[in-house]
Amino acid sequence: MKKLIVILVLVMMSTGLYAQQAGQSTLGFRIGIARGMVSGLSGNESNVSTLNPVVYYAYTFMDNFSLQLEISTAVRAGIDYEWWWGTGEWRYTSIDIPVLLRYNFFHGLLGFMAGPHISIPVGYDYINGGDSPSMTFGVTAALQGLFPLGGVRFVGDLRFITDFNNIVSDLRRQALAVTAGFEFSF
């Protein structure tokens, strides 16, 4: 797990060195709340709120298009479940890595982003036993607002996150997230 994080940071840094020569680069930080549903194929549903800190790097390769790589953590706590072996509570922590194509419009004040994501489990806890979580793949789409504040920009976004495969057994995530933060161009 540590090797994967180190490799991702090195990739972000190396593309940043190239991106400074080829076009505009942006580094940003956001924090937000995601409210979503973890649902199961057998009818299990649990509403979940998570706190999501996000660090991202974006490289503008055309006037209005950017490629944005994000790393965020998500702590999902208090997911209640009921299966044939009993009921319990499940806590799950993951590192989410979306790779998004961003299109800016209205002079760069609004943006739309979409792309795939991977969610890597880094911690979990079952109150009454259960399966280990697996890596998930999905899609993320967002509408973003950018507001200049001197040398930085205030960033707010509203995003939809869904997974294609199950986290564990028959549990699958869908969430709506609101985040806010700052970004710096260099």
Image: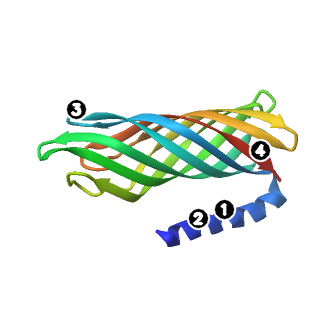
Residue at the spot 74% in from the left edge and 34% down from the top edge: 146
Rendered location of residue 38, percent (x, y): 34, 38
Between discs 3 and 1, the one toward the N terminus: 1
C-alpha span from label 1 to label 2: 6 Å
Q: Of tags 2 and 3, which is closer to the observer? A: 3
From the viewer's perspective, is residue 107 above or below residue 170? above
Q: Amino acid at mark 4?
A: Met
Between discs 2 and 3, the one toward the N terminus: 2
Q: Of tags 3 and 1, which is closer to the observer? A: 3
Observer able to see residue 69: no
Helix, strand or loop at disc 3? loop
Around disc 2, counting alpha carbons within 10 Å, would you say few (fewer than 14), some (14 to 19), or many (20 or more)?
A: some
Judging by the rendered image, the residue that carries numbered circle 4 is: 62
C-alpha span from label 2 to label 3: 37 Å
Between discs 1 and 4, the one toward the N terminus: 1
Q: Amino acid at mark 2?
A: Leu
C-alpha span from label 3 to label 1: 40 Å
Judging by the rendered image, the residue that carries numbered circle 2 is: 8
Asked if marks 1 and 2 touch (Cβ < 8 Å), the reply is: yes
Q: Amino acid at mark 3?
A: Gly
